[in-house]
Amino acid sequence: MEIAFIASDSKKELITEFCMAYCGILSRHNLYATATTAKYIHAATGLEVESLFAGVHGGVQQLVSRINYNEIDILLYFRDPSSSEDYLDKQFDLVRACDAQSVPVATNIATAEALILSLDRGDLDWRMLVNPKYKNGQN
């Protein structure tokens, strides 16, 4: 599966700890993250994470695009609910894209844990029917 991560600055440490806790599960999947988040996750876990642009420099738009093309199966977005209004529009774009493409999204650690455990049980295997990567026999 294709798992994307994004974290507000105040949540970088939390998402890193989450990835450390679920490193065994995450290591079996393809991981993507905005630049700084990718750097934190890789440094703490050794997991291979494809680094996108920084969130404020186009990384959010890259994720929205990949979600809209069904190239992301799960989005783990540890967000700060007290973010500035400018960033709220980008947050809305991410969540709207996930809703439009039926991509499971977690915006906090509790739902992220539920999604990762569901992924490990195989509950999200239906995503292989819509992700073009799996239709072409890849992965």
Image (cartoon, rainbow, N blue to C red):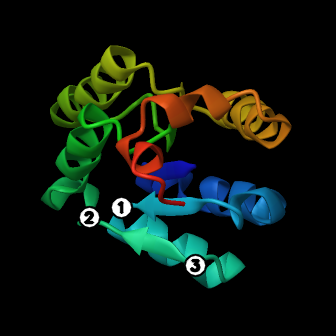
| Type of amino acid under label 2 | Ala
Contact between marks 1 and 2 (CB within 8 A): the answer is: yes
User: Which residue is tagged 3?
Assistant: 42
Rendered view: 137 above or below 45? above
Label disc, if present, on residue 124 of the rendered structure: none
Question: How many callouts does the rendering have?
Answer: 3
Residue 106 makes an appearance in the image:
no
Q: Considering the numbered disc 3 on the image, is that residue within a helix, a strand or a loop?
A: helix
Residue underneath mark 2: 54
Q: Residue at x 73, y 61 (%)?
A: 17
Above or below: residue 137 compared with residue 79: below
Taking 139 as reference, is 132 above or below it?
Answer: above
| Residue 60 percent location from the top left of the image | 25, 47
Say which quarter of the image contains residue 118: top right
Image quadrant holding the C terminus, namely bottom right
Q: Nearer the viewer, residue 114 or 16?
A: 114
Q: Is residue 133 left or right of residue 109?
A: left
Q: Position of residue 40 (x, y in %)?
A: 54, 73
Q: Is residue 53 visible?
A: yes
Q: Which numbered disc, 3 or 1, marks the residue that appears first in the sequence?
A: 1
Q: Check disc 2 and report its element: helix, strand or loop.
A: loop
Residue bearing mark 1: 34
Position in image of residue 21 (x %, y %): 82, 59
Q: Position of residue 28 (x, y in %)?
A: 71, 63
Determine contact: label 3, label 2, CB under 8 Å: no
* C-alpha span from label 1 to label 2: 5 Å
Name above or below for residue 130 compared with residue 39.
above
* CB contact under 8 Å: marks 3 and 1: no
Q: Amino acid at mark 1?
A: Thr
Which residue is more in the foreground, 26 or 18?
Answer: 26
Residue occupying the point 56% across, 77% down: 48
